[in-house]
Amino acid sequence: MAVLNKLRAGESNVSEFPRRVLVVEALAGTLRTSWIEGRLEEYALRGARTFHLACAFEKGGPWAGVTGLFSELFSEIQYDRPDLIEPHGFELAYILPSLRRSLKVRNPNLTDMAPSSERTRNYPADRAVRNIHGLIDLIDEWKTAVCPESPWVIACDALDEAGAMGSLFFRELMRRRGKSLNIHLFAGASPGNGQSVCMSFDSGLQTRLVAARLDSQPPAAPDSLQAGGAAAELEERIGDDELERQANLPLLIYLWKAAGRSDKLFRYQFLALETYNTQGLYADAIRYGDGLLDLASREAPGDDDLRWLIFQKLFMSHIGLEDVDTSFRLAEDTGLPLAEKDASRRNQLFYLMAILYARFKKPRDLQKGEEYLELSLAAIAESDMPEGERHFRYVFNRNGLAMIRNFQRRPEEAIELCRSGFAYLNEHLGADEHRLHRSILLYNTAQVYAAIGVHAEALEYYSATIAQDPNYSEYHNERANVLLQLDRLEEAEADYLRAIELSPPYFEVFTNLGQCYRRMGAMDKAIEQYSRALDLEPGHLLGRLGRAKAYEEAGQRDNAIDDYSAVLAKDPSLWEAFGNRGALLYEAGRLHEALADFDAAIKLRPSMGELHENRAIVLSDIEKSEAVLVLQQVR
């Protein structure tokens, strides 16, 4: 990747549809926009469908550019392939909130439905990535059916200013489907940022950087009066419509910031932090949370409850990204002063500190974690919280202790803490209270049983968890893993398929289904599922290794060798992969390569007698072939 061309305004150097990403580096402004539009017009005259998307986070938020693309495509997809809308309704409503009025979002789970006061589980950061892959699958299914050969040129202006999720969508779209769907990406970036944009794309893509010499000035800041008027008009149009408010949150923040209205800015930035934290968009939520505590001190002085809520959301966002150092600083600098005179907050803060020490700190400090749990428990007794809340927080605290006991390899105690906690909630709370946390207690019990190999109880508790929360994909995936260990393959297959149905795609479940089909002897199906997993996550070693074995068992020797080679390039400590590749290389007549593989495998696993036997056979064949060669030379 290098700067190959330097262009002036009016010049193009666009003569074909390159299968690559083209990054144009120039000052933002009307000239850059005009230059991009001119190039898109040239592409359109050559038969391409073009899209001009504004990708800057500041105006468009986490999904800037992505919302523009799907706003344009949605009605066409709905017309051409209405059968695709409902299966992808969750992802579509995620980026276009207004669609929730007309779309039925299938299969909500308790994490989605729990009221904020009972939402005791945050999604891991990688769960939001599933929505990106689901959206890419939607484009793939529709374009393949309707216009597979039609070239697309997508111009992502200000891609260097995109949010974490928006930029990842376009990177993954080009990696996964750029070539097969004939999609080309044309990105605008500010001077000095073009190379990093190029580098962010998959190394397998042909990426080109162009520096355009445009005599342009950066766009002027918006007029404060005009911005305030536009914001007020937008607020009036939105009224009390929460979906429209969420859809327009980034623009409201941009306009009120330009208008200099810190009171309005504070309100909407807090709403954005809360919204995107709940959705698991942690990096983008943090961008809205930066400076919010200072704003709260100015706009709501003395409102410690509000500052505590901001602290919690920021803390959970940093924990979602596993940023332990920042989480500790937040807890000590902000959390402790706010909790000092409030026992309820101390209970929550000390619990969070316990989880930091016991789960996220490297290495874990289980003793410190348990000490903070005891401090948290003592704070419950000191507080004046309602009785029902007191009961819940006691059980929530003991669930943290169950986690520590499990890490300490004391599974029986961990199981008893979860089981007794579930019974305690049933005894002291109404049936509709804290349903999510009750299901989590059952799930944690199932996980501990599965980890220690007590399969019958693990299945019992996974099934009980699913009865409580039937639409949580991971529960079906994990129950299937236990069924797979028991060789109950048809039941495992059904659970894996149900897990796939309940969620946008994630690579783990497809890898597991591949393992199931390989055990069934259905190699073609196994290869298909492993390939699906690797399409989502090319670096997943288990999926690559599983596919290598499936190729081997299906007699596809060259494909198997390629996959084993990819595995060993990432992890050269896998003796079995060396051994299996060595056997395949021997079959292919590549004797010296086979010998090198068996040597490597024996070095890693010298006690494996079969490796020594195979090496001896290879060595014997090499000696024979060399002897034959010598005879031929003599004659």
Image: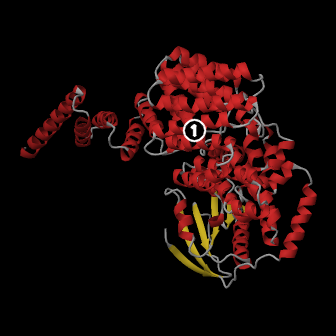
Count numbered badges in the picture. Answer: 1
- The residue under the point 72% across, 65% down is 58
Asked if residue 466 shows in the view, the reply is yes
Q: Is residue 323 left or right of residue 121?
A: left
Q: In terms of depth relative to the viewer, which is nearer, 623 or 374?
A: 374
Residue 68, how many percent across, how many down? 76, 58
- The residue under the point 68% across, 81% down is 10
- Where the C terminus falls, by quadrant? top left
Residue 504, how many percent across, how many down? 66, 39
Figure quadrant of residue 110? top right
What amino acid is found at the position of numbered circle 1 in the picture?
A: Leu
Q: In terms of depth relative to the viewer, which is nearer, 615 or 272?
A: 272
Q: In this view, does 415 lie to the left or right of 90?
A: left
- Is the residue 410 above or below the residue 379 in the image? above
- Is the residue 462 above or below the residue 39 in the image? above
- The residue under the point 79% across, 71% down is 258
Please identify the residue farthest to the top as the structure is shown.
456
Residue 131, how many percent across, how many down? 67, 44
Residue 123, how many percent across, how many down? 64, 41
Asked if residue 53 shows in the view, the reply is no
Q: In terms of depth relative to the viewer, which is nearer, 556 or 243?
A: 243
Q: Is residue 473 left or right of residue 563?
A: right
Please identify the residue farthest to the left as the structure is shown.
634
Colour mode of the rendering: secondary structure
- The residue under the point 50% across, 43% down is 357
Mark 1, Cα crowd under 10 Å, few <14 / some 14-19 / many 20+, is some
The residue tagged with tag 1: helix, strand or loop?
helix
Q: Name the residue under label 1.
A: 375
Figure quadrant of residue 380? top right
- Is the residue 335 above or below the residue 41 in the image? above
